[in-house]
Image: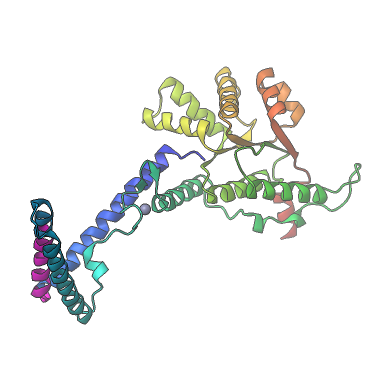
Amino acid sequence: MSLDGKLLRQAIERLNEEKLARAAKAAKLRAMVYEKHPRVREIDAELRSIMLDAIGTAVSGSLDVEREIDLARKRSLKLQAERSEILAAAGCRESDIDDEPNCKKCGDSGFLGAKPCGCLMDIYRDEQRKELSACLKLGQETFNTFCLEYYDNVKDQTGVSPRETMSLIFEKCKKYAREFRKDSPNLFLSGGTGLGKTFLSTSIAKVVSEKGFSVVYDTAVNIFAAFEEEKFGRGSDASETREKVHRLLNCDLLIVDDLGTEMLTSMVSSALYTLINTRLINGKKTIINSNLSWDELDKRYTPQVASRLKGEYVVLNFCGRDIRLKKRELI
Ligand SMILES: [Zn+2]
């Protein structure tokens, strides 16, 4: 599972902001408690001095180190008990004014050695959800809201109805999302407008992202625009564009919506090949939604692109009538 640099940076920033906010809140509350209960301030000062003395004793080489440390420990416990009593009577929790780390494992650093701690990963996943929601425009599409009733149940010349075919595709997509891992296949969702390609790929994106994988969802037009901006150094922020292209090439799952609607130029052809090929080499998974049929790929794209797609992608042929029109008929 690869972590996205931009999202990890955002998560670390949030972790630090939350830490500072907690510290500021604790300091404010502590000042209020000191004001009302000066004895607490005295105790805190004394506890600090006992601790410093104990350190001094420990390194002094004194013969009586053990006894002195024991005395300090007893004095310290007594003071802490008195402090707890005052705070309890004042209705204040010690943890609120002591600014203890929220995460005992990493002490709020966010890392255990070089590895991100669970607390940082929780924030990271939240950032990932927000990022994905932004590009999915917060749609309501989930496997639970997918409705097979919109597909005709009349068998066609092959002896299978669109509903039966779509029911199989629906199950495959659910299984794909549920079992997504490094060796999952790449998918090519093919079929006309309004047959549920975006709906089902969006649903996959949500489930896979929830599992902690980095998922990027964008239209082919936007993806190629990013490649073009990067190549020609256009755009207001070149480093942001570079980062976007890096994410497109390296995220665990990329969903390319509407391939085939972009204007085909040599630049787009080469970007598409780079995208598909780099992701294959890096072992990253891709789902492509397209109105193009398997055969139309040959006509539109270079033989290299078409052969990569045909050799490395599993095609799911969506069928039926545009369900957006059908929904209107049913209203
Ligand atoms: Zn932690």
Query: Camera-side residue: 26 or 58?
Result: 58
Residue 68: percent from left, percent from top: 11, 63
Left or right, residue 232 beside residue 194: left
Left or right, residue 314 beside residue 97: right
Residue 74: percent from left, percent from top: 16, 71
Left or right, residue 250 beside residue 80: right
Q: Is residue 123 visible?
A: yes
Q: Is residue 302 visible?
A: no
Left or right, residue 199 beside residue 64: right
Compared with 103, 290 (above or below) is above
Q: Is residue 44 rendered magenta in the image?
A: yes
Q: Residue at x 44, y 25 (%)?
A: 230
Q: From the image, give the main secondary structure of the stretch colored magenta.
A: helix
Disc tally is: 0
Compared with 66, 152 (above or below) is above
- The scheme the figure's colours follow is rainbow
For the record, the magenta segment spans: 36-52
Residue 292: percent from left, percent from top: 71, 32
